[in-house]
Image: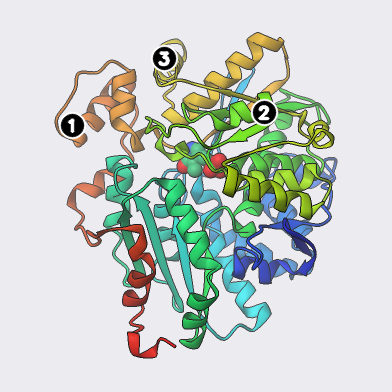
């Protein structure tokens, strides 16, 4: 069962929460009691990704049929991934890059969005829902494509993606606007990710608009990490990474590790915290930000302030000031006091800031915040390649940098899992710049230059983009989002109440 962060008297099942995405009170669904995973179970020794996934999902979704979960896992994590291990690990000294980008769209969002459609389908079966589903997605670049790939072509579902028209990389944009299935709808909007996410949340919780949809036999759902169905699958890879370090005798079972996570909407790092609450021995959560370092300030000063400049950076998927999932950590730190969480969220909305009350601080002591400037991000890419012959993307570079800063400051010797969140080929201009390659006018020439310099190969999904037709060429204003949804669903004014 689940609560809402803004109503701890709520009792809602996983299947209902996965369909709804966000609670009617604007809160996010949170887990009531975390089951614990017994690390000593023999199945975890030399376990495949799928084995760990089945164990973690079955313990959380304890009311769901285990056979069904096993089937879903096998359908989600298969040869759609370009690596048999699903999540390979690259070790450099005591840092272990958890490569989460081997799925179809080359970013870690695939880890959850490959399985979310299956979780949603099962939820629809379990609740006997008799409506078509409209999925609204705000994206800072990677969620959009991963959601389109996961939900494209599925009967009974329409998926809408809204991306900041000037805020994503060329490759990210091309990946989205060439999506061909007729149930996919993609729009550039005249704002940044925060604007897109706020607008989507508002549409979700707008009673009048929901009524229009309901009367046309539709219901909303979300593919963003506000949906608990996105976070649950992300818990798996922290356990998996840990078991791999044990298999390789790098750590002993029970030994603590750190994790360093390049953070935007706070979903990925929150999943790591959830893993800890399920028994994974994590010492520190290194919350790594780019120049939009609102979270670094928060963990250092306990004050969250969004009345600040917004920057476009070379790690665009983290260009976010309002990290939605932090609300879930606050709920935990407030020991389930949903009134207190509501007050803080109201302050954020109306005063653009809130300060963490004293008693909550002790619950956040295992978090450490730091950030990388644009220059430091490029230096990190260059250094890791020059010293180790290993190529990382700008987001991963932010996490690498923050971890190094942490280690120098604290001399902490724990082994660290670094969440490696995207293929470097999604961000060719920044990567080429970091490697001091000569500037090319054509992005495909840049890709080839990177491949040549680093002796790696351009992923086929990226090469294919050259020949793909542009399907979605609409840029709209935020105020038009609702109307565009109605148009695409063929809901005419006449049917409006
Ligand atoms: C989404 C994304 C992030 C940020 O993850 P959150 O869960 O939003 O904190 C980091 N790196 C990449 C490449 C991403 O796509």
Q: Residue extending furthest left?
A: 441
Residue 379, numbered label: 3
Q: Which residue is mark 2?
A: 299
Image quarter hosting the N terminus: bottom right
In the image, residue 386 above or below residue 221? above
Element assignment for label 1: helix
Q: Is residue 181 above or below residue 226?
A: below
Label 2, label 3: how far apart the Cα atoms are: 25 Å
Q: Residue at x 33, y 22 (%)?
A: 454
* Towards the viewer: 298 or 271: 298
Q: CA distance from mark 1 to mark 2?
A: 41 Å
Q: Residue 236: tell me if it is visible.
A: no
Residue 154 in picture, x, y percent from top left = 44, 72
Label 2 SS? helix
Q: Secondary structure at mark 3?
A: helix
Q: Residue at x 44, y 37 (%)?
A: 319
State left or right for residue 173 relative to residue 72.
Answer: left
From the image, tell me which residue sits under label 1. 445
Q: Nearer the viewer, mark 2 or mark 3?
A: 2
Q: Is mark 3 within 8 Å of ligand 1?
A: no
Q: Of 484 and 125, which appears nearest the observer?
A: 484
Question: Is residue 132 left or right of 46 when viewed as pictured?
Answer: left
Camera-near label (1 vs 2) is 2
Q: Are marks 1 and 2 in contact (CB under 8 Å)?
A: no
Quadrant (top left, top right, bottom left, bottom right) of the C terminus: bottom left
Which label number is shown at residue 78? none
Q: Earlier in the sequence, mark 1 or mark 3?
A: 3
């Amino acid at each position: 069962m689940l609560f809402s962060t803004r109503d701890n008297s709520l009792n809602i099942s996983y299947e209902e929460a996965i369909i709804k995405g966000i609670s009617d009170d604007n809160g996010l669904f949170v887990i009531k009691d975390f089951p614990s995973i017994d690390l000593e179970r023999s199945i975890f020794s030399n376990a495949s990704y799928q084995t760990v996934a089945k164990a973690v999902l079955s313990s959380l979704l304890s009311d769901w049929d285990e056979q069904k979960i096993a089937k879903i896992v096998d359908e989600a994590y298969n040869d759609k991934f370009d690596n048999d291990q699903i999540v390979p690990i690259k070790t450099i000294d005591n840092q272990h890059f958890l490569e989460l980008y081997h799925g179809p769209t080359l970013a870690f969002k695939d880890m959850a969005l490959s399985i979310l459609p299956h979780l949603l389908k099962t939820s629809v079966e379990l609740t006997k829902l008799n409506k078509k589903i409209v999925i609204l997605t705000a994206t800072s670049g990677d969620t959009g494509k991963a959601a389109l790939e996961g939900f494209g072509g599925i009967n009974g579902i329409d998926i809408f993606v809204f991306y900041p028209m000037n805020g994503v990389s060329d490759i990210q944009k091309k990946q989205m606007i060439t999506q061909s299935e007729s149930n996919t709808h993609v729009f550039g909007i005249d704002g940044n990710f925060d604007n897109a996410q706020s607008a989507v949340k508002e549409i979700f919780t707008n009673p009048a608009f929901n009524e229009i949809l309901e009367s046309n036999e539709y219901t909303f759902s979300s593919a963003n990490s506000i949906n608990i169905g996105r976070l649950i699958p992300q818990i798996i890879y922290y356990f998996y990474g840990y078991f791999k370090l044990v298999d390789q005798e790098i750590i002993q079972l029970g030994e603590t590790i750190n994790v360093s996570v390049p953070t935007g909407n706070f979903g990925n790092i929150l999943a790591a915290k959830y893993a800890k609450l399920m028994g994974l021995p994590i010492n520190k959560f290194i919350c790594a930000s780019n120049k939009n370092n609102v979270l670094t300030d928060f963990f250092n000063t306990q004050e969250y302030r969004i009345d600040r400049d917004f920057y476009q950076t070379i790690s665009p998927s983290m260009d976010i000031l309002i990290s939605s999932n932090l609300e879930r950590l606050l709920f935990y730190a407030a020991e389930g006091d949903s009134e207190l969480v509501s007050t803080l969220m109201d302050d954020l909305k109306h005063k653009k800031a809130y300060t963490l009350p004293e008693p909550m601080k002790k619950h956040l002591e295992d978090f450490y915040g730091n950030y990388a400037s644009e220059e430091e991000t490029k230096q990190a890419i260059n250094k890791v390649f020059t010293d180790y012959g290993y190529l990382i993307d700008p987001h991963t570079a932010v996490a690498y940098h923050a971890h190094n800063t942490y280690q120098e400051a604290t001399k902490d010797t724990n082994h660290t899992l670094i969440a490696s969140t995207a293929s470097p080929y999604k961000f060719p201009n920044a990567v080429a710049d970091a490697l001091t390659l000569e500037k090319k006018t054509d992005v495909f020439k840049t890709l080839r230059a990177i491949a040549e310099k680093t002796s790696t190969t351009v992923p086929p999904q990226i090469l294919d983009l050259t020949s793909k037709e542009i399907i979605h060429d609409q840029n709209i204003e935020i105020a038009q989002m609702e109307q565009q949804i109605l148009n695409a669903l063929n809901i005419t004014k006449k049917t409006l109440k």
